Each structure stands twice: as structure tokens, then as C-alpha cells.
Image (spheres, rainbow, N blue to C red):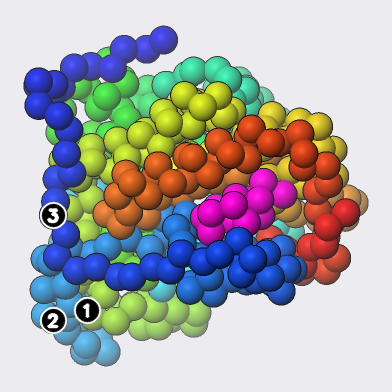
Amino acid sequence: MWQYYKLFDMEMPFAEAYKIKMVESIYKSSRQEREQWIKSVNYNLFGLKREQVFIDLLTDSGTGAMSDRQWAEMMLGDESYAGASSFYKMKAAIQDVLGFEYFLPTHQGRAAENVLFSVLIKEGDIIPGNSHFDTTKGHIEFRKATAVDCTIDEAFDTTLLHPFKGNVDPEKLETILKTKGDKIPFIIITVTCNSSGGQPVSIENLKMVRHLADKYGKLVVFDSARFAENAYFIKLREKGYEHKTIREIVLEMFACSDVMTMSAKKDAIVNMGGFIAMRSKELHSKASVFNIMFEGYITYGGMSGRDMNALAQGLYEGTEFSYLETRIRQVEYLGKRLIDFGIPLQQPTGGHAVFVDAKRFLEHLPKEEFQAQTLAVELYREAGVRGVEIGAVLADRDPVTRENRFPALELMRLAIPRRTYTNNHMDVVAVALKNIYDRRETIRKGLKITTEAPIMRHFTAAFDLV
Ligand code: F0G
């Protein structure tokens, strides 16, 4: 196993790097209520209302708590249509923290993908990367292009401990560049890699991707939603980085890319927002056309001035070591409790979430009965905890054959919102899952899909008991 570099004086117990100024009530429902509610939404957890959920681990996207300083920045927001000072504040933060000269605000991450891909992707193209996120893949396939997964094989064995399960396999990447190079406009690297379990990519691997991209004359795009969590893992796990600051590591990571898309709802700790940043003035001006068409004028994209201010502040807070340490240790805490109960998960635990291996948890159920969705419904019934399926439902059907795709990993993700829950909440989640694990043999039937959308079906699909 790799070494965790010792960075702290461990004589003191660990505690959060913040205190709480404002709270929000949550409701503990009865099992009877939950049985009725989950049936009424056709066993799709996206259909539940906020009041029907006790601990909401559906996503870490836009669900975090902003700081006092971010709220203060909201008050200073400038809502000028063109040339708002908030735009320039965001521009300065992006230049400072990420090192990009040009940027375009968008309302969230998938909007950044939509604008950028409108410039870069045409029908028949191939986009290699490390387990593309669903909206990324959706925007690629919507343009009749193909996403090719070049993630290392180790990522697909949840029992294997590997420090950088988000890494790209150099052979897989070079093979596709060599054989299909003329169809490849860019390589996309997701940091951290959400689909493989919030797993980081090493600097060494990012440099390898840069090298191959240069060799074959391709652009490198980073899907950067959780770039700061990636940098934290590099600091802890990659030799030579233990004494560098998170900001230094972030700049070194992005030095390997030409363009980045960002869902700021994650590591910039805002409730809404995103952007594209790039080094090329020409790409900026081409993308501006689509930004104006889909998002808004180039100095606000889909964002209000106050949100741009909070985002700029969030980029600084999100790249502070003490914040990242608090956050990722909470995810580790939940992971450790589950491992102690013998529950199978993607190991090591990721940056933003614990990914329970539903294939191993409910191994007696056939994959056609959607093990991860079944487990997520069961966890909701047990304790009002809402996780999300990252498996065959999310994988959609093959765009050509229309057959269900069954990915290598069938996971139930428990994503932890930033600065939102305490470890007591994590204990409730862990004990609820243990209860289910102890009686897993009694879960004899899974779920079937009754209706679904043609693309990104997981948000709205209806299910019924098999
Ligand atoms: N890229 C990654 C790696 C993501 O995780 C997400 C969103 C996006 C792009 C799209 O960003 O939501 O702002 O449009 N992930 C959320 C999640 C939804 O739950 O993991 P968005």
C-alpha cells in the first residue's frame, strides 16, 4: 500500500476547521411514511421532496454550506449586464488559483460542456478520457460522437487499494490516438474521477496525458468539478508533493491542460454556477458565440453578479488545506465505519463520496434487477437516507443497439455535501446500511424500469418491483 505522508501533529484529536453559525431543521419520518412516499415516486429517489428525506446524500453538487465570507460577497455582487465588477472578481480568482487567462461564466457544469462541445465536437468524433461523467457523455453522444473510457483496469476492482484509481491507462490512450487520431478533437480528464468513485488522478499521470496529447497534436480538457480534492490526494499520496501547498499543486495540475470546464457547485462551494477557462484567445472567441446564444452575455453567462462573487471567494476557500482536510476526513470516516461493518465499497474512499459496491452487496440479485437502485431504495426505506445509483440505470442504453448497458461498476453513491452534516449523521448512515447488510439475503427481488427518457434516463425513470 502507498504511504500517507505524515503532515500533522497527531497528538491532538482531529476537529472541523470551522464552527456553525446557521442551522436548518430536517425531519425524521416513520418507516410507514417512507414506504408510501417511495412507492408514490415510482422508486426513483429523484422524485422525493426535501421534507421526505432525513439525510440527503444524493449529491454534493450545490448542496454545501457557504461561509460567512461568501455570504458577505453576495451582498457586494454587481448586477451590471455588461462589464460587472463581479465578472472581474471571478476572472482574477480564476487567473490566480487556476492559472487561466480567458474564461466564460455558465450557469453550471453541463452548460460549460454544452458551450465548449458546440465548438469542438462534430458527428463521428471520438473523445477519450477517464470514465466520463454522465452529463459529459450525454453531451458527447447527443452530438453523435463517442466517449471512449481509457481508465486503468485497477479502477474497476473495488477491493484493490490503489492511490490513483482515476488514472488514465497510457496504452489504452495511445492505442486510440494512434488508430483513431483523425477523429479525436481532444482528450478529457475528469479530476477527481466521479464515475470511478471520486478517485484522483496523479500529477505523473496528467503529465503523461499532456505528453501524448502533444505527440498527437490534441487539446487536453479537464473536467474540473473536484480539482481541489484531487490536489489534496496528490499532496497526501504522491511522492514529492507532500510539502507543496494545495494552490501550488492545483497550478501544476492545470499546467497539463489547455481548457477546463467547471461545475462550481462542487469545489467552489456555491449553490449554482460554472465556467469554461482556456488559454487560447481564439477558442474563447469561438465559444463566446455559443455562450451568448445558450447562457447569456459573456460577462455573466448564466450567473448573477452576487453568485460570481461567492464563486470567486469559494475558489480560495475550496483550495485551503484545512478545509479540504476536514471535508475528506469526513468521507473517510463514513468509509471506515462501513468497512468495519464488512460492507463492500470502492476502496480507497473517494474525495466527495463513499461508493458502496452494490454488485457485491446484493450479489444474489441479477444485474437486470438494478442492484444499486434496489439498494438505494432499501437505504431510504431503512432510515430516510437518500443516496444515488451509479450503475446500469445511469449508464443508459447503447445509442445504437438500444440495449441496456451494464458497466463494470454497479455502485450506490453516498455523496457528502460540503460543511453540511456532522459525523453523527454519518453514524446514522453507517448503522442503517449495516442493518440492511445483515438482512441482505432477505431482499429477494430488485426493480424493473417501466418508463424512461431516451437519454439521461436516471433522473426521471419510473420503476416497479420485479
Ligand atoms: N462533471 C462532473 C465530474 C460532475 O460530477 C458533474 C456533476 C458535472 C460535470 C456537471 O456539472 O451538475 O453543474 O451541470 N455532478 C453532479 C453529481 C450532478 O451529483 O455528481 P453540473
- In reply to whether residue 381 is colored magenta, the answer given is yes
N-terminal label among 3 and 2: 3
Residue 231 in the figure: left or right of residue 342: left
Badge 3 amino acid: Lys
What residue appears at the point 16 percent right and 59 percent down from the top-left corner?
20
Give the percent coordinates (x, y) of residue 270.
30, 65
Cβ atoms at labels 1 and 2 below 8 Å apart: yes
Quarter holding the N terminus?
top left
Q: Which mark is residue 193?
A: none
Residue 90 in the figure: left or right of residue 446: left
Magenta stretch, main secondary structure, is helix
Q: Which mark is residue 75?
A: 2
Residue position marked by numbered label 3 in the rendering = 19
Q: Which residues are magenta?
A: 374-387
What residue appears at the point 27 percent right and 62 percent down from the top-left corner?
65
Residue position marked by numbered label 1 in the rendering = 306
Cβ atoms at labels 3 and 2 below 8 Å apart: no
What residue appears at the point 64 percent right and 32 percent down from the top-left corner?
438
Residue 204 or residue 425, whichever sits in front: 425
